Image (cartoon, grey):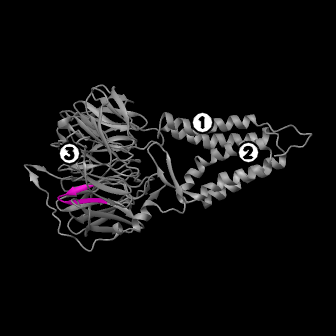
Amino acid sequence: MTESANRQPLRLWPGVVIVVLQLAFLHVPGYIAPASPLMFFGMLGSLVVGTLLIVIWWLFLSRAKRSDRWGGLALLIVVHAAAILLADTSARMVAFLPGVPWLCAIFVASLFVKKRTLTVVAVLVASLGWTLVRTGGVTGTMSTAYAWRWSETAEQQFMDSDAAAAPSGPRDTPVTQTQAGDEIVGWPAFRGAGRDGVLDGVRIDPDWSQNPPRELWRRPVGPGWSSFVLAGQRLCTQEQRDEDEVVVCYDAATGEPIWVHQDAARFWEAMGGPGPRATPAYDDGRLYTLGATGVLNCLDIVTGNPVWTRNIADDSGAPVPVWAFSSSPLIVDDLVVVHAPSAPDGNGLLAYDRVTGEPRWSGYAAGTSYSSPQLATMSGVPQILMITAEGMSSFAVESGELYWKHAWAPAAGADRVVQPAVVDDGAAVLLVTVDGGTRKIAVSTDASGGWTTGEVWTSRSLKSYYNDLVLHRGTAFGFDRNILAAMDVETGDRVWKGGRYGNGQVLLVPGQDLLIVLSEQGELVLVRATTDGFDEIARMEVLNGKTWNHPIVVDGVIYLRNSEEAAAFRLPG
């Protein structure tokens, strides 16, 4: 802005210092500790404290003319507020962060030219540019994917394609699961029959350079972060399709749809995008699904017709959580158990009659959590474990009675997502959170039937966010934020760390000491599940787009999906 001859020049150096620190607090913590409280507090400080300091400097320390000071501030507020209101819904969050800090930086930089017109143009471009873009959510490290606002989303492209067409009717596809002894061959629930990501009886040829996985089929799918369940040849998952949340049953051999069940519900949030989060569960001819807004369905696996329907938001009084209802149903005995975070009375663990859908009991599991109920046997007693914002609790299967509770609150804003991992002897369990790391909890009972728990160790060697771990030969393998790592279960010490696979998911092949990793970038990777150090032995690209969904493996075939497409590959060997 032009200065008269009798005025001192603008004092710009404080503004420069402030915006340099502002941008440093915005970006540097994300490189040091992605998706951590440090990162979020750094971003918040950049937005609130940095912007406040810029305002103080400009109004009282800049030496600008009074009309320029107040006019410039009004310009910044009015233009950027208008940009936020006019921006695509998906871009409004980034119009604040990083939009406001970068607006401050561009404003200060424009002052060096000393032309009001250039400053006005710079502010208009820096603010209104956000109205031209939309986002496709963020990655696990909080990196944002941008696209032109007028371009079609992956969901819109899918809805315009033939792949979104409803099947003409249920097809004659086998549903009965084959049995080998007492073991059911299939994938009946989230992370498998034991909900632990372990692939017993699987053998893979690790030499993918000579004998890589062979693609069987590939198809577009609606958005959502559910995984698959497989009953016979019926491969089921959840998707968002425009204003309907759907449960889809595909033919596992071809990827062709068999039936589609629709509910008039839509969930969307800016970071994860649209769609349901929870994985279905299968038992005795019926499929149990929990939608993002709380719709709990029991569907006939042959036809997709509803047997009964509940809404856990209505039943518990819980509001739809920020990241949606994400609890994958647990089928145990004659119950289906789910979690409704933030139920007003704290009784968020809900059990329904598996046959009729009638409520059976509720258990105290208060606070926000995106974990799912886990069946475990501790000290010889079957029980349901539930990770919550307060820590971990255990409940009697038949009544919901509280057996024991271990308190360990996470840091502010660090919600818990992953499943508890029960140590082999059933006397200890691992509780994982992204901010505090991993805690081993010893669990025991006395002669009178009372329960006690105690902290064995707390370690920051493994800090998982929404990436479940597996246990093998006394070692926990999982993600330390977005890097694969191994941790000694006895001591909590880190064994090794390596392999930047983003926020991916992992399965264990215990018979071969192998990990199957599905990276956030859609790569399929084989890694040695040993304590000898990180050793990647094979890798190939299998999916396009951000991939957070858990893979499944049945009869030598791996079934994969993300928010844009699904595919099946025959594993070698």
Q: Out of 63 and 215, give the one closest to the viewer.
A: 215
- Left or right of 142: which side holds 85? right
- Left or right of 53: which side holds 65? right
Q: Type of residue at label 3?
A: Pro
Q: Which picture quadrant has residue 170?
A: bottom left
Q: Which residue is mark 1?
A: 24
- Residue 236 among those drawn in magenta: yes
Whether 105 is drawn above or below 341: the answer is above
Distance Cα–Cα, label 2 vs label 1: 20 Å
Q: Which residue is pictured at 24% across the width and 52% down the height? A: 189
Q: Which residue is mark 3?
A: 572
Extent of the magenta region: 228-237
Neighbourhood count class around disc 1 (C-alpha, 10 Å): few under 14, some 14–19, many 20 upward: some
Distance Cα–Cα, label 3 vs label 1: 47 Å
Neighbourhood count class around disc 3 (C-alpha, 10 Å): few under 14, some 14–19, many 20 upward: some
Residue 210, position as x, y percentages in the image: 23, 41
Q: Type of residue at label 1?
A: Ala
Q: Which picture quadrant has residue 497?
A: top left
Q: Secondary structure at mark 3?
A: loop
Q: Which residue is mark 2?
A: 110
Distance Cα–Cα, label 3 vs label 2: 60 Å
Q: Earlier in the sequence, mark 2 or mark 1?
A: 1
